[in-house]
């Protein structure tokens, strides 16, 4: 019965408040999201901070409906065997995530999470990313033709940046083409849009409320305006 009440409210666009700072995932983040799904991470992790004091104290600001407009399907989850990830972005370094996937006990003593060490070895299929972007656009995500055409290239660039930072922090090297980098990119994005700066809007002259400049006093060097004698005015009107 709850499904009949809840689902229609999210199928009607006007029922979901828009948030100006929420943007679609980058090509690499979208690839990482696919890995998150394929590995079944949603079975143990939720992505929904409820408006309850205990949850906001632990995880941060509660989740807003407008944050999930580009999640198809959304990853709210139903169990928390592991912690909620709705505000995971920016909490840990990229290297921390890599070490955590290689062996969770190295970062979290007592963790019951299995290792995902193969993500550090398995190559990422960059060539499949444009097709994935096209599919998401068909579902309403506003990817442009240029973003789709250059999706693989954009993903490689972001992956190279993340891999270089991981290596700089004394982590594993040669990860730029591995699946783990995409998953790290996705996790580091989660929950951050709500606190991002809104995009700058072009100035509209009609909205310019700047008062006009006051008239300037004539310069002493300016020529005196021509004067007309009253008699000349009377003669002209006769």
Image (cartoon, rainbow, N blue to C red):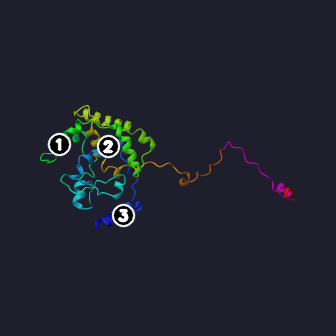
Image point 71% across, 44% down: which residue?
223
Q: Considering the image in quadrants, where does the N terminus appear?
A: bottom left
Mark earlier in primary sequence (2, 3): 3
Which residue is depicted at the point 40% across and 57% down? 18
Foreground pick, 31 / 61: 31
Specify few, some or many for label 1: CA neighbours under 10 Å numbering under 14, 14-19, or 20 or more: some
State yes or no: discs 2 and 1 in contact (Cβ < 8 Å): no
Within the magenta stretch, is there residue 229? yes
- Residues 47 and 39: in front is 39
Q: Is residue 18 shown above or below 129?
A: below
Q: CA distance from mark 2 to mark 1?
A: 20 Å
In which quadrant of the rendered view does residue 55 lie?
Answer: bottom left
Q: Indicate yes or no whether the magenta region holds residue 225.
A: yes
Q: Residues within 10 Å of mark 2 (few under 14, many from 20)?
A: many
Note whether residue 7 is visible. Answer: yes
As helix, strand or loop, the secondary structure at mark 3 comes to helix
Q: Which residues are magenta?
A: 220-234
Q: CA distance from mark 1 to mark 3?
A: 38 Å
Residue at screen point 25% across, 55% down: 77
Q: Would you name the residue on which mark 2 appears?
A: 31
Q: Quadrant of the C terminus?
A: bottom right
The chief SS type of the magenta part is loop
Spot occupied by residue 120 in the image (x, y as percentages of width and height): 23, 37
Q: Quadrant of residue 184?
A: top left
- Let me know if residue 209 appears in the view: no
Q: Which mark is residue 115?
A: 1
Q: Position of residue 67 (x, y in %)?
A: 34, 54
Residue with the mark numbered 3: 9
Which callout, 1 or 3, points at the residue further toward the start of the chain?
A: 3
**Quarter of the rendering containing residue 105:** top left
The residue furthest bottom is 1
């Amino acid at each position: 019965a709850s499904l009949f009440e809840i689902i229609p409210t999210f199928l009607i666009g006007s029922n979901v408040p828009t948030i100006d700072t929420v943007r679609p995932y980058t090509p690499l983040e979208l690839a990482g999201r696919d890995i998150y799904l394929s590995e079944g991470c949603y079975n143990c992790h939720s992505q929904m901070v409820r408006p309850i004091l205990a949850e906001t104290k632990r995880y941060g600001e509660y989740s807003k409906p407008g944050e999930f407009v580009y999640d198809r399907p959304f990853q709210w989850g139903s169990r928390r065997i592991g912690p909620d990830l709705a505000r995971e972005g920016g909490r840990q370094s990229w290297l921390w995530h890599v070490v955590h996937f290689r062996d969770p006990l190295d970062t979290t003593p007592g963790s019951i999470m299995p290792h995902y060490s193969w993500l550090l070895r398995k190559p990422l299929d960059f060539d499949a990313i444009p097709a994935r972007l096209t599919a998401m656009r068909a579902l309403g995500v506003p990817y442009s033709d240029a973003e789709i055409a250059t999706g693989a290239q954009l993903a490689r660039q972001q992956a190279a940046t993340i891999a270089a930072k991981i290596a700089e922090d004394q982590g594993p090297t040669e990860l730029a083409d591995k699946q783990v980098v995409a998953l790290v990119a996705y996790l580091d994005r989660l929950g951050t849009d709500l606190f991002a700066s809104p995009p700058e809007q072009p100035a509209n002259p009609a909205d310019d409320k700047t008062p006009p400049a006051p008239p300037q006093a004539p310069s002493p060097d300016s020529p005196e305006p021509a004067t007309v004698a009253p008699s000349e005015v009377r003669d002209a009107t006769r």
